[in-house]
Image (tube, rainbow, N blue to C red):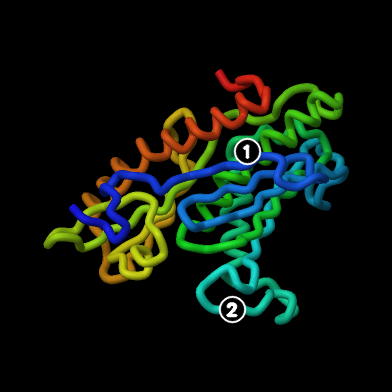
Amino acid sequence: MARIDGREYNELRPMRITPDFTKYAEGSVLIEHGNTMVLCNASFTEGVPRFLKDTGRGWLTAEYDMLPRANRERSSRDISKLKVSGRSAEIQRLVGRSLRSIVDMSILGENTIVIDCDVLQGDGGTRCASITGGFIALAMACDRMVKAGVLRKMPILDYIAALGTGILHIDGEDRAVVDMCYEEDSTSIADFNVIGTGSGRIAEVQGTGEGRPYTMEEMMMVLSVTMPALAQVIDEQKKVLRELGIREWIL
């Protein structure tokens, strides 16, 4: 089975994670997944949104943006339209709720963590790279807050990562292929964003039939291919955090 870049159907693109990429953020990571590059910064700030005031609980949110020349053609900055684009808003909500799913907000106190995801270069899977890299930046920020005495313990309950998987027509059959690049994504029959945890649970699945509706059997085929690949990504997250001296806090 031949994919456009020669990979096997279940083979990931090369991934590189560079921690402490910027100087000032409590947690900072540049994640490169194939030709996709996303800078993820985690910032720890005092205070919470109004709906959480006086509850003793914290909050985590995310912002997502793409540099004008991150893609093959220049795009306008959101600020030039005086509003966040619909795509950016949808993606930052996905990143925020994915990371919130593995954080105990009661441990944060009335503090907020903001995950900024800036796409430097896009070649498919930018939202997934934002979640995968955003988790590492989050872990780095929380570890520093524990060491500074701001948090009594790590609020993170599990690892989390994401991959884009699609159904492609290759060599006369429809197959699920993991970690699509842009060319594959743009020609897929259906595409999925699968967010999974280190314990093997699913936080969210986004699935869209681009060329036609997909079947239940095809959706299960996508999950059966993606979950083992997500475990590989999470192993890379663990490796980076170990090298940073951040202890294994998850049972």
Q: Amino acid at mark 2?
A: Arg
Residue at point 74%, 36% (across, down): 141
Mark 1 or 2, nearer chain start? 2
Q: CA distance from mark 1 to mark 2?
A: 29 Å
Q: Residue visible at 51% across and 57% down?
A: 36
Q: Is residue 89 left or right of residue 225?
A: right
Nearer-the-camera pick, 127 or 232: 232
Residue carrying label 2? 74
Q: Quadrant of residue 150?
A: top right
Q: Indicate which disc residue 136 carries.
A: 1
* Other residues around mark 1 within 10 Å, as few (<14) / some (14–19) / many (≥20): many
Tell me the quarter of the picture where residue 60 sits.
top right
Q: Provide residue 74's location: percent of width, then percent of height.
A: 59, 78
Residue 247 picture location, percent across and down: 65, 20
The image position of residue 94, as x and y in percent, is 57, 54
* Residues marked 1 and 2 touching at CB (< 8 Å): no
Amino acid beneath label 1: Ile
